[in-house]
């Protein structure tokens, strides 16, 4: 019997971590088991993360503790992607001011580049990644070098980072400080830019990867920017409501409950004459309203609503939420 599961159309999964594999210190229910099944259906697995301060082996070890299949070679962070992006932008042996962790400096060395400690060394480039020990003097050195014309790469531009005590400033705030001082904008390797996803796919030699994430503004946007199919899971940050309202660049190819849904057929969605159908759900757009006949707890209703709204609004530069009008079906 032919395999008609969603994952059957792809040769690799590029998975986000927080909100997809785990939430806090614990694995999301069913996620580990779903990841373990990928090898049995001939699908490769890689993890993509914006974290630039932890080594790939450290991340892989944490995943293995949860029971997920992982090695250092299957974890792709923005430090590695940033170093590779930098290596493509400067000659071999170029000097690089590393504003970030020891792991980031190691990645730079692996690309045949030479880390230096000061802007006085007249570095050819600056690479900037998060490290909690960074201070004003480090940012000043980066600004001096960037201001003199050094090639500038940022591993990622996350504006916040979750910590045990709350939300703290992320690498994006540090990058913004250097940008404000120099008037320049860096090349960015991490989500939502394409290089991190392209790096992972290239190392896997994957021709048809599926990007799986829980955030529209990083995972889905980044996968779309890389030209890959994207699946948004509902185990993390974003919801069917935010997916429906998403701007065009952040709209996922698939909307699924969790990783286990990759092994089930994805329902066919038909749109004709302004009406979208998915399963027993029907949706149509009337001005700024999406009229839905279906059960609001049934994901097919949201899939139909997305298809109808996105078809009516194909070019949205900003998130735009429609008014929802529900006609509940029998038993809904």
Image (cartoon, grey):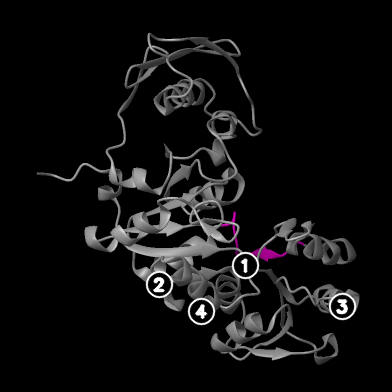
User: Cα distance, mark 3 to mark 1?
Assistant: 25 Å
5 relative to 141, above or below: above
| Residue drawn at 27 percent across, 63 percent down | 39
Q: Position of residue 98 (x, y in %)?
A: 72, 81
Q: In this figure, which residue is indicated by the disc labeled 2?
A: 203
Give the foreground label among 4 and 3.
4
- Report whether 258 appears left or right of 43: right
Q: Report the front residue among 68 and 100.
A: 68
User: Cα distance, mark 2 to mark 3?
Assistant: 35 Å
- Report whether 175 appears left or right of 15: right
**Mark 1 closeness class: few <14, some 14–19, many ≥20 residues within 10 Å:** many
Q: In this figure, which residue is indicated by the disc labeled 3?
A: 144
For the N terminus, the quadrant is: top left
Residue 323 part of the magenta-drawn span: no
Please, what secondary structure does the residue beneath circle 4 have?
A: helix
User: Cα distance, mark 4 to mark 2?
Assistant: 16 Å
Give the foreground label among 3 and 1.
1
Please, what secondary structure does the residue beneath circle 3 have?
A: helix
Please, what secondary structure does the residue beneath circle 2 have?
A: helix
User: Cα distance, mark 2 to mark 1?
Assistant: 18 Å
Q: Report the front residue among 331 and 151.
A: 331
Q: In this figure, which residue is indicated by the disc labeled 1?
A: 51
Q: In this figure, which residue is indicated by the disc labeled 4?
A: 57
């Amino acid at each position: 019997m032919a395999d008609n599961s969603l994952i059957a159309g792809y040769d690799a999964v590029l998975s986000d971590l927080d909100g997809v594999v785990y939430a806090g210190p614990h694995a999301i229910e069913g996620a580990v088991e779903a990841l373990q099944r990928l090898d049995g259906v001939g699908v490769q697995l890689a993890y993509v993360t914006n974290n630039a301060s932890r080594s790939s082996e450290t991340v892989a070890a944490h995943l293995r503790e949860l029971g997920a299949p992982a090695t250092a070679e299957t974890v792709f962070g923005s430090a590695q992607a940033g170093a590779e992006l930098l290596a493509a932008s400067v000659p071999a042996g170029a000097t690089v001011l590393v504003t970030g962790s020891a792991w980031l400096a190691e990645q730079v060395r692996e690309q045949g580049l030479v880390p230096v400690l000061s802007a006085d060394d007249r570095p050819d480039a600056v690479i900037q990644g998060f490290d909690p020990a960074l201070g004003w003097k480090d940012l000043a050195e980066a600004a001096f070098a960037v201001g003199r014309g050094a090639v500038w790469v940022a591993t990622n531009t996350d504006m916040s980072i979750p910590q045990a005590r709350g939300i703290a400033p992320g690498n994006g705030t540090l990058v913004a400080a250097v940008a404000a001082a120099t008037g320049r904008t860096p090349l960015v390797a991490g989500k939502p830019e394409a290089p991190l996803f392209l790096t992972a796919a290239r190392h896997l030699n994957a021709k048809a990867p599926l990007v799986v994430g829980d955030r529209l503004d990083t995972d889905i946007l980044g996968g779309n920017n890389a030209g890959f199919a994207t699946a948004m899971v509902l185990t993390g940050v974003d919801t069917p409501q935010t997916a429906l309202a998403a701007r065009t660049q952040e709209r996922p190819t698939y909307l699924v409950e969790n990783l286990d849904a990759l092994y089930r057929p994805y329902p066919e969605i038909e749109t004709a004459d302004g009406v979208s159908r998915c399963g027993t759900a029907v949706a149509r757009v009337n001005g700024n309203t999406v009229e839905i006949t279906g059960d609001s707890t049934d994901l097919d209703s949201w899939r139909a609503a997305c298809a109808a709204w996105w078809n009516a609004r194909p070019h949205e530069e900003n998130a735009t939420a429609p008014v929802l009008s529900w006609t509940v079906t029998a038993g809904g």
